[in-house]
Image (cartoon, grey):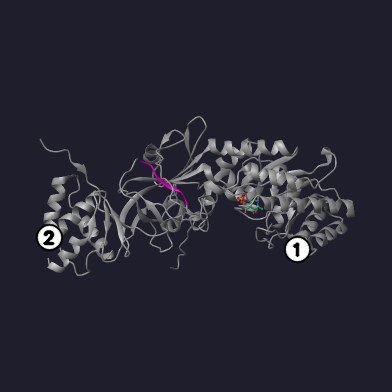
């Protein structure tokens, strides 16, 4: 009788390197992910194609409720506002709306999108360095909260308010230096150099607007919760100063977004899921900063958070299919997949966690994972210790829910379907894949060509 | 194959678990079972066709042509300086 044969596996050769863990990040066990919220990855791809973005409603709701529950324990008056630019697909915005979030928009296009979705003007916050006159007019008419970014906008807003014959309550965005994060001083008025105080004086002496709110957004993917304690304290003390010195009552303080998700920055040594602070650490830091406010609860300002990334990143997955295996000149293995940097701009910032969607065995090798573009920059992972993959194998790229389906681009290939799996296990398309017809519909060829 | 090369290959130590030690450079490598099998056949002086048919006898595979895998592995051995760049098989 024949001896049972061993299964053939492509021959590999991996050189041992001293300190190789530095090169690949800490060696992390790779566990296949065969299902997303009960749906087999294979079935999702067969039904909706590859590549495919998949959103988990369960994760979104869980994250949102977790943050709200923690805030409720520490501060009596708070409100989340969904940062549209993080992900403005209607279905995504609708979930946050249903969970009680307001909308935070930074352009007329986003403003219009929120209104069309049925979000009342009075539950929208309008931010950003460029607000058109027509957006400001609509915002004033509908009671949208406007956070003024610079002096020119202040004058423009006064003009619009004057024309409408109203004296609206508005906020200003401020910026300041913090010990552990760089100052985003291009947005808003600087606190330390007196610009913010000048803006308040200018606003109050103009007598056409009433200052009722203070806004800041200290950065994004802020890994140090203490930065929030410091920032919140600065905001609270500024509000107190305005009250004591100018008799102004600040009715809301908006701390913007910026909490980190569990992704791993290229510059980070340890994986994000080991070092990213929890919501409770951020909330604790904010609560400590808010202790600088005093007065009866009824007079405490309403606290807004515009958390984006940390609420949606973990809810998003990108499924891909292996198209080819090849060898680079240094012997390193390379894998070509059908999704790339045009769908996954965040691979410029993160070492995304990528796991096979099926069981695997074989020797792990240093591997580069490339996208399908005929462009050198199309790299999803430059160097990851990875098991062998076959053409047709599926991969799950994790934690891709923030900023990708807004910053993606149509380039060389078309953008894929986006689906959402509901908490009761239903899966629906929330954005259809593009076709050539969608694209050429916007083009014209002048008759003289 | 020339004898100097065969001697060099013979001196390379390969353990059952696929651990490779090159006494000339001190470098260490890891290979899988197929790699270990091919290295053994190369040490014995086999050519590409013989290696391919030995693999077929020993392993279960539906791959039609194993030669690209074998050449790719030989390239890796050259890259690792376990075989000279001039190696022909
Ligand atoms: C004003 C403002 N609020 C909120 C956000 C959301 O930030 P994040 O996704 O880091 O939470 C941003 C993003 O840059 C922003 O500019």
Q: Which residues are magenta?
A: A352-358
Task: Determine which of the numbered discs, if any, sits on residue A152 in the image.
Answer: 1
Chain containing mark 1: A
**Residue at 24% across, 59% down:** B72
Quadrant of res B9: bottom left
Quadrant of res A94: top right
Q: Is residue A135 left or right of residue B85?
A: right
Disc 2 crowd rating (10 Å Cα; few below 14, some 14-19, many 20+) is: some
Q: Is residue A185 left or right of residue A3?
A: right
Quadrant of res A156: bottom right
Residue at the bottom extreme, as displayed: B86
| Residue behind mark 2 | B45
Disc 1 crowd rating (10 Å Cα; few below 14, some 14-19, many 20+) is: few
Chain containing mark 2: B
Residue A262 seen by the camera: no
Which SS class for mark 2? loop
Residue B42 seen by the camera: yes
**Where's residue B12, x and y in %?**
22, 60
**Residue at 65% across, 53% down:** A108
Task: Determine which of the numbered discs, if any, sits on residue A392 in the image.
Answer: none
The span from disc 1 to disc 2 (Cα, nearest Å) is 81 Å
**Where's residue A293, x and y in %?**
81, 46
**Residue at 75% across, 39% down:** A77
User: Given this view, does label 1 or label 2 mark the residue nearer the observer?
Assistant: 2
Residue at the top extreme, as displayed: A424
């Amino acid at each position: 009788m024949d001896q049972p044969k061993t299964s053939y596996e492509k021959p590999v050769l991996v050189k041992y390197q001293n300190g190789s863990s530095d090169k690949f990040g800490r060696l992390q066990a790779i566990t296949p992910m065969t299902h997303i919220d009960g749906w087999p990855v294979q079935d999702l791809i067969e039904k909706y194609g590859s590549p495919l973005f998949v959103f988990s409603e369960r994760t979104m709701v869980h994250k949102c409720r977790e943050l709200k529950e923690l805030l409720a324990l520490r501060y009596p008056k708070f409100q989340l506002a969904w940062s549209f630019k993080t992900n403005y697909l209607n279905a995504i915005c609708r979930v946050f709306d249903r969970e009680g979030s307001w909308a935070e928009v930074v352009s007329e296009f986003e403003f219009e999108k929120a209104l069309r979705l049925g979000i009342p003007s009075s539950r929208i916050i309008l931010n950003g360095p460029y607000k058109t006159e027509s957006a400001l007019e609509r915002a004033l008419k509908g009671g949208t909260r406007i956070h003024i970014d610079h002096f020119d906008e202040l004058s423009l807003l006064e003009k619009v308010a004057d024309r409408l014959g109203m004296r609206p309550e508005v906020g200003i965005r401020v910026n300041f230096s913090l010990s552990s994060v760089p100052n985003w001083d291009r947005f808003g008025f600087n606190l330390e150099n007196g610009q913010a105080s000048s803006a308040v004086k200018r606003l109050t002496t103009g007598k056409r607007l009433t200052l009722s709110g203070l806004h800041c957004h200290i950065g994004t993917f802020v890994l140090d919760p203490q930065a929030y304690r410091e920032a919140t304290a600065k905001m609270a003390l500024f509000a107190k100063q305005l009250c004591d010195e100018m008799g102004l009552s600040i009715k809301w303080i908006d701390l913007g977004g910026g909490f980190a998700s569990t992704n791993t920055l290229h510059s980070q040594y340890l994986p994000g899921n080991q070092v990213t602070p929890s919501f409770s650490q951020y909330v604790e830091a904010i609560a400590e900063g808010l202790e600088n406010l005093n007065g009866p609860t009824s007079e405490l300002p309403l606290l807004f958070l515009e958390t984006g990334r940390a609420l949606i990143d973990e809810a998003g997955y990108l499924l891909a299919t292996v198209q080819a295996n090849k060898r680079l000149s240094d012997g390193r293995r390379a894998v070509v997949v059908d999704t790339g940097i045009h769908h996954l701009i965040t691979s410029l910032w993160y070492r995304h966690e990528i796991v096979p969607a099926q069981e695997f065995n074989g020797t792990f090798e240093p591997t580069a994972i490339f996208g399908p573009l005929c462009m050198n920059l199309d790299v999803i992972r430059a160097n990851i210790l990875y098991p062998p993959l076959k053409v047709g194998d599926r991969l799950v790229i994790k934690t891709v829910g923030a900023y990708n389906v807004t910053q993606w681009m149509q380039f060389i290939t078309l953008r894929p379907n986006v689906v959402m799996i509901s908490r009761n296990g239903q899966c629906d398309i929330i954005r259809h894949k593009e076709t050539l017809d969608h694209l050429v519909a916007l083009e014209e060829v002048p008759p003289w060509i | 194959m020339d004898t100097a090369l065969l001697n060099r290959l013979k001196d390379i130590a390969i353990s059952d678990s696929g651990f490779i030690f090159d006494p000339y450079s001190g470098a260490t490598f890891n290979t899988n079972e197929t790699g270990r099998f091919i290295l053994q056949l190369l040490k014995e002086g086999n050519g590409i066709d013989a290696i391919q048919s030995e693999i077929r006898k020993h392993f279960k595979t539906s791959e039609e042509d194993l030669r690209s895998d074998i050449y790719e592995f030989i390239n890796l051995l050259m890259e690792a300086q376990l075989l000279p760049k001039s190696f022909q098989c």
